Image (cartoon, rainbow, N blue to C red):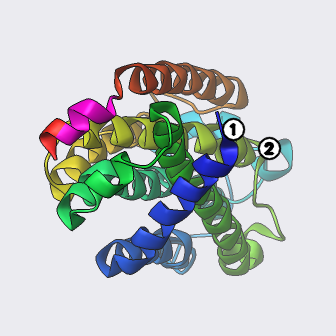
Amino acid sequence: MNWRTVRAIAGKDLLEVRKNRLAIWSILGLSFILSVGMPLLIGLLPFDVGPSGGDLGPFEALMTLLPPALQGLPDGARMVVLMLGYFLAPLFLIIPLMVAAIIGAESFVGEKERHTLEGLLYTPATDLELYAGKVLAGAVPSVLAAYLNFTAYAIVVNLVSAHIVGGIWFPTVTALALAVWVGPAVALLGVSASVLVSTRVETFLEANQLTGLLSLVIVGLMVGQGSGLLLLSLPVLLLVGLVIYAVDLVLIRLGAAVFSRDRLMARA
């Protein structure tokens, strides 16, 4: 496989995505809401920072996740830590998933809508190089977007909560595991699924909607943690990431096996 050809295909796709203003503004808007808006909202809520020892209801199950240094905080401060450091943390997985879904959906179905697919398919690149270029185009920016947004979130969280908690406390170990280990796995999941879907549908909107169903998995993780049914501790996150990487491998191998430029030409 010629990696120079793969990078050229990926670069062309990224240039096309940059021209899609709706996609760019959607990514920027969601990034701002999750990275800046939500931590500001939670940090500015009038939490009671009185004596500790109160009953936090279903949040009590999450107290076992707090580092020992934060266990003795007042109830209000612990609520801030739980909301910003644990309950909202799975929402960050939506960012790499969304970026991957948008770029992946643009991969082939976007070419169809712009009537440039035939020119791409007649290039001397092999089927595997075409497929790898599309996957690379979605994987790299989605992972970068996840890391950049996580960094912005960490800065805002510490700015709005340091005076409540008593110092800089974020990111926690579990939050780092979520960003560094699970984030790239989710990005690959979104890319591999969206590229595979885009070879089977006719419009960008249809491909994006089908891939967007993957966000239900993330919502399930967030609801499970918020209700206390699933505690996203470090061992659990390592296992979740491992499972997602396994699914990624299956989808990528499946996509590479079923991809056929002849079939795409017939559907163009």
**Local crowd size for mark 2, using a 10 Å CA cut-off: few (<14), some (14–19), many (≥20):** few
Horizontal and vertical percent for residue 134?
A: 47, 47
Residue placed under numbered mark 1 in the picture: 181
Chain part drawn in magenta: 260-265
Residue placed under numbered mark 2 in the picture: 67
Q: Is residue 126 above or below residue 30?
A: above
Image point 32% across, 29% down: which residue?
A: 260
In the image: residue 54, left or right of residue 12: right
Mark closer to the chain start, 1 or 2: 2
Q: Is residue 70 above or below residue 186?
A: below
Q: SS class of the residue under badge 1?
A: helix
Image point 37% across, 36% down: which residue?
A: 193
Q: Is residue 78 above or below residue 234?
A: below
Horizontal and vertical percent for residue 242?
A: 62, 22
Image point 35% across, 46% down: which residue?
A: 121
Horizontal and vertical percent for residue 199?
A: 26, 39
Question: Which three-letter amino acid code belongs to the residue tagged 2?
Answer: Pro
Question: Which three-letter amino acid code belongs to the residue tagged 1?
Answer: Trp
Horizontal and vertical percent for residue 105?
A: 32, 52
